[in-house]
């Protein structure tokens, strides 16, 4: 997703920090002064205030009216929406606010906050003399059975975006009521872009005619289908930003991985009895995630049981933390994310029957009552200690007591991975001393390293069943507040001496028009050149010079580490089978990456992988197959994988052509 | 075993802020080095600079370089700490190119620091 705001970053900061808000309308200036007053009944968090400021700046100074805030789950989006509604009502004379969400769970949460103008009163958003506007900000919820009159009568109209879809009668009617009676509305999308594309796009397109302002709020702007909303991103406030606040506003993540040797992940297809190891499941996991496979893969009972044990150890630790650090003010919950419904059922059975843990199962096949139950998990009157789901419980399902997450499935897309982990990040404790973690039980073979990097996780490997850790051991370090202590040391950033391009639209347009159609793609592939380059295969170090950092000119000379004294071959391993595996994996990664960039589904992964492997053996292995190549040849090929990816990427349309003009097997 | 390598560098002498936040042990080491380096007058990681660049895939993204540094002689630099294995990554190259241009327009210098 495009970060549109970057060129205005410095100007915005100067504007915000001035405290006088130059260049906005006088009404807005008064409103912002009111919003930031120190004696508000409840104050916005710094980043919430920043989000509102950015929206104001983008709308009034940059004249943008379709905006997107990328804000972490738990980052308090509702209060931001409330403040923006108040500003538009008080300063821009907008009187109809449409709030759209993807599902009933998100809707219920928004309903709680906007009912009876609660959010406006709690935060005191409406300035003196304008408090009566609260009466014009009544709530109507669009839901099956609700008549359209409420849409006309209420200032705030809330509903699942499906309530405006043309494919159902009430949707047609609701949209018609809006279009026929309103000319100036503001639209808020809370995570609504994560709904299927075509109808969503149509609805928003229709609303554009009457929407003077639109604000999208989401923790994951890139959709699972690779597309992003068409609004302009004006703020990125991610997981690591929220963890760095003092006190943190979300939990920190600690990942526990068992010893590789003690838990081997294997799977069975119950329909055919076929068995697979985790290494053979990569493609299958990806297909399942995209809904392209209906095979009901089930984790074998032995690894499933072992992972559950590790997770229950974590639950025990979390219960101790809840007791010692929070006086048992909440009841920690284990959340198990399964591969398929059958996998989920098995996990539920093992938890309930073998470990006597009261476990709720929530899948697409669940009754409404069970979904309701999922929302009250962790409350004093809920009897459940664990919940098992496939991908049902994602955005909007916000249960802070979720303290342990067991991942039985592998995530292939950033969107799903972040959404699921996001379920465990809301804090139970508030206040200066709040230090909470979400414990994730994972497995090295699921290769979630990218995800742990994104969420700034601490990783503990080699965790055995029965290993219990002290409650303090895995807590994040306490952070000190950051403030300007010595203004003399602030560094002024120079103004550019020549004008900078406001955005990259021109560059991007150029990139787009060059998409080619290459029926004879094989010839192009055969012409790709991989020059012989000097490769460093062996390193011998004579001495090591240490450069002191105190500015002195002396260098310390040390002996090299023993292993480097006689020359050491680099680029281990030399085992051809291992190298072949590395090469195949990296070619698969390149293939998957190329497909993603061209917007082609992974159903073509096998085919493109075949084409690339053929290319590798022709152009990089001198015509040999991977199995027949020597370790040197394999290493040579491996070292050129970036170049290979670059060759393909340099010709937009090439990959699409390879798929379009399919090579016969 | 990788732990939380994030933390606070407290009471820096050459930064305007009460603490400077680091996200890796490398960054912490570099902060210590900047404090010792006599040619450096001021530094911070908390500068809010976002530089636009176009990724290999044609998306525009914001790049946040690590350190803003002012030398005793008044010159200003951006320093990026990067593991050597990432330097050939195509998007890293694009980021660094964008940063060089950004700096050139401000008579600043962009420096990649690696270990």
Image (cartoon, grey):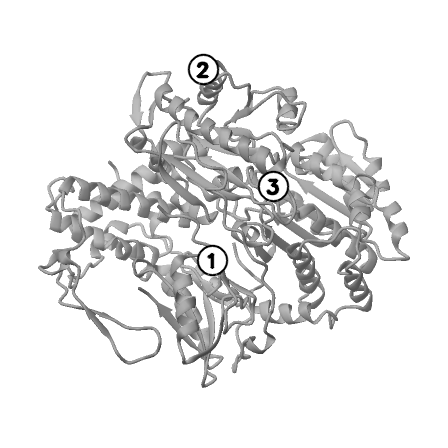
Percent position of residue A446, x then y: 36, 36
Percent position of residue A65, x then y: 68, 58
SS of the residue under disc 2: helix
Q: Residue at coordinates 71% horizontally, 34% vertically from top-left?
A: A108
Up-down relation of residue A14 to residue A90 (above or below)? below
Q: Which mark is residue A354?
A: 2
SS of the residue under disc 1: loop
Q: Which residue is mark 3?
A: A427
Which subunit holds the residue at mark 1? Answer: B
Closer to the chain start, of discs 2 and 3, is: 2
Q: Is residue A107 left or right of residue A198?
A: right
Q: Nearer the viewer, residue A245 or A65?
A: A245
Up-down relation of residue A568 to residue A251 (above or below)? below
Label 2 in the same subunit as label 3: yes
Q: Nearer the viewer, mark 2 or mark 1?
A: 2
Percent position of residue A163, x then y: 70, 35
The total of numbered circles placed on residues is 3
Q: Which residue is mark 1?
A: B59
Q: Is residue B1 left or right of residue A164?
A: left
């Amino acid at each position: 997703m495009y970060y549109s705001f970057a060129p205005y970053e410095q100007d915005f900061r100067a504007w915000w920090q001035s405290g006088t808000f130059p260049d906005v309308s006088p009404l807005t200036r008064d409103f912002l002064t009111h919003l930031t007053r120190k004696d508000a009944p409840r104050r916005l968090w710094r980043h919430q205030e920043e989000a509102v400021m950015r929206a104001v700046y983008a709308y009034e100074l940059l004249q943008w009216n379709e905006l997107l805030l990328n804000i972490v789950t738990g980052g308090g989006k509702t209060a931001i929406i409330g403040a923006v509604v108040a500003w538009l009502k008080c300063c821009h004379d907008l009187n109809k606010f449409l709030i759209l969400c993807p599902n009933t769970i998100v809707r219920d949460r928004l309903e709680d906050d906007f009912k009876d103008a609660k959010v406006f009163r709690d935060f005191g958003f409406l300035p003196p003399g304008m408090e009566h506007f609260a009466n014009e900000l009544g709530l109507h919820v669009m839901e099956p059975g609700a008549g359209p009159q409420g849409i006309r009568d209420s200032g705030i109209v809330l509903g699942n975006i499906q309530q405006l879809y043309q494919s159902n009668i009430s949707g047609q009617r609701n949209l018609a009521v809006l279009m026929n009676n309103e000319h100036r509305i503001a639209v808020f999308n809370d995570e609504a872009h994560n709904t299927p594309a075509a109808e969503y796009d149509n609805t928003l397109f229709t609303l554009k005619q009457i929407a003077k302002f639109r604000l999208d709020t989401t923790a994951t702007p890139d959709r699972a289908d690779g597309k992003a909303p068409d609004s302009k991103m004006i703020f990125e406030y991610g997981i690591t930003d929220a963890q760095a606040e003092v006190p943190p506003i979300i939990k920190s993540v600690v990942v526990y991985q068992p010893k590789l040797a003690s838990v081997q992940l294997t799977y069975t297809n119950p329909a055919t009895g076929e068995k697979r190891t985790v290494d053979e499941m990569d493609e299958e996991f990806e297909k399942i995630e995209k809904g392209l496979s209906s095979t009901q893969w089930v984790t074998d009972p032995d690894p499933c049981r072992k992972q559950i044990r590790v997770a229950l150890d974590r639950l025990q630790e979390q219960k101790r933390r809840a007791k010692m650090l929070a006086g048992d003010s909440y009841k920690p919950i284990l959340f198990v994310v399964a591969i398929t419904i059958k996998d989920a059922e098995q996990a539920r059975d093992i938890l309930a029957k073998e470990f006597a843990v009261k476990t709720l199962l929530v899948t697409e096949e669940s009754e409404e009552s069970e979904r309701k139950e999922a929302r009250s998990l962790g409350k004093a009157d809920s009897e459940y200690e664990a919940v098992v789901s496939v991908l049902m419980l994602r955005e909007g399902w916000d249960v802070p007591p979720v303290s342990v997450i067991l991942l039985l499935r592998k995530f292939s897309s950033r969107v799903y991975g972040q959404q699921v982990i996001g379920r465990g990040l809301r804090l139970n404790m508030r206040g200066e001393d709040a230090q909470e973690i979400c414990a994730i039980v994972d497995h090295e073979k699921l290769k979630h390293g990218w995800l742990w990097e994104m969420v700034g996780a601490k990783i503990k490997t080699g965790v055995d069943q029965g290993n219990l850790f002290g409650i303090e051991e895995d807590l994040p370090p306490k952070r000190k507040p950051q403030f300007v202590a010595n203004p003399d040391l602030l560094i002024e950033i120079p103004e550019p001496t020549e004008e900078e391009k406001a955005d990259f639209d021109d560059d991007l347009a150029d990139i787009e028009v060059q998409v080619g159609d290459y029926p004879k793609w094989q010839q192009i592939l055969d012409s790709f050149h991989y020059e012989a380059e000097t490769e460093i295969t062996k390193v011998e170090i004579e001495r090591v010079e240490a450069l002191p950092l105190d500015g002195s000119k002396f260098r310390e000379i040390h002996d090299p580490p023993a292993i480097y004294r006689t020359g050491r071959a680099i680029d281990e391993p030399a085992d051809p089978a291992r190298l072949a595996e590395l090469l195949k994996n990296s070619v698969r990664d390149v293939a998957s990456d190329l497909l993603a960039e061209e917007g082609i589904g992974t159903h073509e992964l096998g085919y493109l992988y075949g084409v690339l492997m053929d290319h590798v053996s022709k152009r990089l292995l001198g015509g040999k197959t991977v199995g027949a190549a020597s370790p040197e040849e394999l290493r040579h090929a491996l070292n050129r994988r970036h170049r290979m990816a670059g060759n393909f990427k340099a010709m937009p349309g090439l990959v699409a052509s390879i798929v379009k003009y399919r090579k016969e097997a | 075993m990788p732990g939380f390598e994030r933390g606070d560098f407290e009471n820096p002498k050459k930064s305007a802020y009460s603490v400077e936040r680091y996200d890796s042990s490398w960054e912490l080491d570099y902060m210590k080095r900047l404090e010792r380096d006599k040619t450096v007058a001021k530094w911070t990681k908390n500068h809010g600079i976002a530089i636009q660049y176009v990724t290999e895939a044609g998306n525009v993204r914001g790049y946040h370089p690590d350190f803003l540094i002012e030398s005793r002689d008044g010159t200003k630099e951006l320093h990026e700490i990067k593991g050597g294995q990432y330097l050939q990554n195509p998007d890293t190259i694009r980021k660094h190119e964008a940063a060089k241009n950004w700096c050139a327009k401000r008579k600043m210098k962009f420096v990649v620091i690696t270990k």
